[in-house]
Image (cartoon, helix red, strand yellow):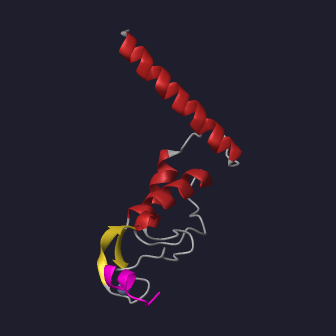
């Protein structure tokens, strides 16, 4: 291992340690989770097709895997982005960037025209 590689790894380790502290201070704890692929896939399809999160279908073996898949699928949906002030279509994106996936409530996005006017 070169000195530069060792130095970069050390910087990475320091960043990871700082990130861990920030996350723990924010109330998170790190765990690893086994995901049941079949359940996750059923959840993904339900979320991606706009289906409801609940009730969890009877064929699902693991509910956590299903919910994880649902969130991933719902987040991958194409979302038409509109200005929350005037309603004009701004463009498209993935839903996870523009919606609270569980409530369906859009995040505030404002078009350039509204941003520069006193409409807000
Ligand atoms: Zn607008």
Ligand 1 positioned in quadrant: bottom left
Residue situated in front as seen by the camera: 70 or 11: 11
Return the x and y of residue 40 as percentages of the image width and height: 49, 52
Name the residue at 36% across, 82% down. Answer: 116
Q: Is residue 34 left or right of residue 27?
A: left
Name the residue at 37% across, 16% down. Answer: 4
Q: Quadrant of the N terminus?
A: top left
Return the x and y of residue 91 as percentages of the image width and height: 28, 75
Return the x and y of residue 66 as percentages of the image width and height: 54, 56
Q: Residue furthest left?
A: 91
Asked which quadrant contains residue 96, the reply is bottom left
> Which residues, given as a range, are shown in magenta?
112-120
Name the residue at 68% across, 42% down. Answer: 24
Return the x and y of residue 109 as percentages of the image width and height: 42, 76
Q: Is residue 30 visible?
A: no
Q: Per the image, is 115 magenta?
A: yes
Q: How many marks?
A: 0
Q: Is residue 95 left or right of residue 23?
A: left
Q: Is residue 80 left or right of residue 98?
A: left
Q: Can you say whether 70 is above or below 21 in the image?
A: below
Name the residue at 47% across, 76% down. Answer: 108
Q: Is residue 90 visible?
A: yes
Q: Per the image, is 27 magenta?
A: no
Asked which quadrant contains residue 35, the reply is top right
Residue situated in front as seen by the camera: 15 or 65: 15
């Amino acid at each position: 291992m070169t000195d530069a590689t060792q130095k970069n790894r050390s910087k990475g380790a320091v960043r990871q340690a700082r990130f861990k502290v920030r996350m723990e201070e924010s109330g998170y704890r790190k765990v690893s989770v086994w995901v049941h692929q079949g359940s996750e896939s059923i959840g993904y399809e339900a979320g991606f097709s706009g289906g409801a999160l609940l009730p969890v279908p009877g064929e699902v073996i693991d509910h956590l895997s299903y919910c994880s898949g649902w969130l991933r699928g719902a987040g991958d949906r194409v979302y038409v982005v509109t200005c929350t002030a005037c309603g004009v279509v701004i463009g498209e994106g993935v839903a996870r960037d523009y919606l609270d996936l569980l409530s369906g409530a859009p995040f505030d996005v404002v078009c350039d025209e509204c941003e520069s006017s006193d409409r807000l």
